[in-house]
Image (spheres, grey):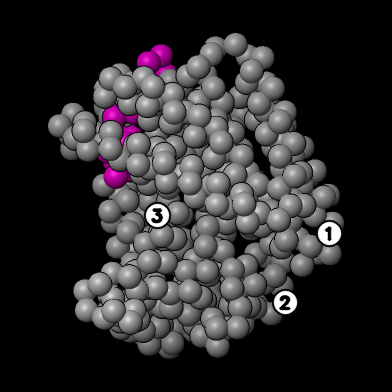
Amino acid sequence: MLSSFKAMTLALAGTLGVGNIVGVATAIHMGGAGAVFWMLVSALVAMVIKYAEIYLAVLYRKNGRGGAAYYIRDGLGKPILAALFSILCIIASFTVGNMIQVNAVALSFESEFALNPFITGVMIALLSFLVIYKGVESISAFTLRMIPLLSIGFIIVSIWVIAANRTLVPSVIKQIFTEAFKADSAAGGIIGFFTSNAVRYGVMRGIGSNEAGCGTAPTAHVTAKTDRPEKQALWGIFEVFVDTVLLCTLTALVILIYPDNILKYDGMVLAIKAYEGYFGEAAGYILAISIFFFALSTVICWSYYAVESIHYFTKKEIYKKAYIVVYCGFCIIGSVSSLEAVWELSDITIALMTIINCYTLISLKNRIKC
């Protein structure tokens, strides 16, 4: 069993990934500054959902193990649905938890350091294997050291840029609120408002960054040494705050300080250009290294989610070890592949997991206490 803080850093490792930088940049590129407002609104909703799923996970855990599959089976009484959720989690570990993360690192390292993507994939595969193979204690020890360091470092760099351009901040904030309520759909009215790019991309990227509702984070939180579900669930609220309210907002403000870049670039390039506006070419190196460690933490954490999903079906270690070998091999595949189909599969699996999990949360709402 882990301390409450260790369990939170383990869960946070699963949510801190390329979405906190690349995802935010894409949301602004596609939805404008208003997407930032809706990203924050979605974070408030995500806090409630995260609290609920962690509460139920701790309530229904058995022998230090648990998660969405367990409260779906034991709380809802639907073992087939729980099994389906576990299968989806294993599939998602290869897509959003692995290949998508590694591919972003490979592209950034190729761009900034001229490093062959295959070498990047091998490097991440080996590092991941060394941590994953030793089990949850090794994984939690890694995330306990890495996540606070990464978060603090990224916060300092971002605040540095924002402080240096503090005279622009009021106009940026005004732009966020002004564009948030701008209906850019031809339909106009209420339909136009809710189908606007600002709402669509802001909410989508906000939920994508903190994974609230898809039922993965509870798997990490059930490892906490606590008999009070509500106590651990509060750490879930803090997790969303750090991930979306703090880190994603800082990324967004830095990007919006240099508005000329938004229409010219997207994704990783847009984020790099924004930080380059203050730090120069060194920003590319800083972001590439940040992406590397963010992604590595996510890859490692998602392997734990999948191993626990395998444990739901069987306690035989041979299956878990085989999965780890294959999983690390997919790091190499992800580094050299085009991921259009992988993104689609990822969206489908995460959507199905979210539907199953949220249906369960609503059905078990009377079991959840504050």
Image side of residue 10 versus residue 76, left or right? right
Mark 3, Cα crowd under 10 Å, few <14 / some 14-19 / many 20+, is: many
Image side of residue 321 versus residue 137, left or right? right
Q: Quadrant of residue 286?
A: bottom right
**Extreme-front residue of the structure:** 187
**Residue 341 painted magenta:** no
First-in-chain label (1 vs 2): 1
Residue 260: tell me if it is visible: yes
Name the mark on residue 207: 3
Could you tell me how far apart the alpha carbons at marks 1 and 3 are, in whole angstroms? 32 Å
Q: Secondary structure at mark 3?
A: helix
Name the mark on residue 115: 1
First-in-chain label (1 vs 3): 1
What's under tag 3, amino acid-wise? Ile
What's under tag 2, amino acid-wise? Glu
**Residue 334 at x, y = what percent?**
71, 48
Residue found at x 49% / y 66%? 24
Name the mark on residue 281: 2
Could you tell me how far apart the alpha carbons at marks 2 and 3 are, in whole angstroms? 31 Å
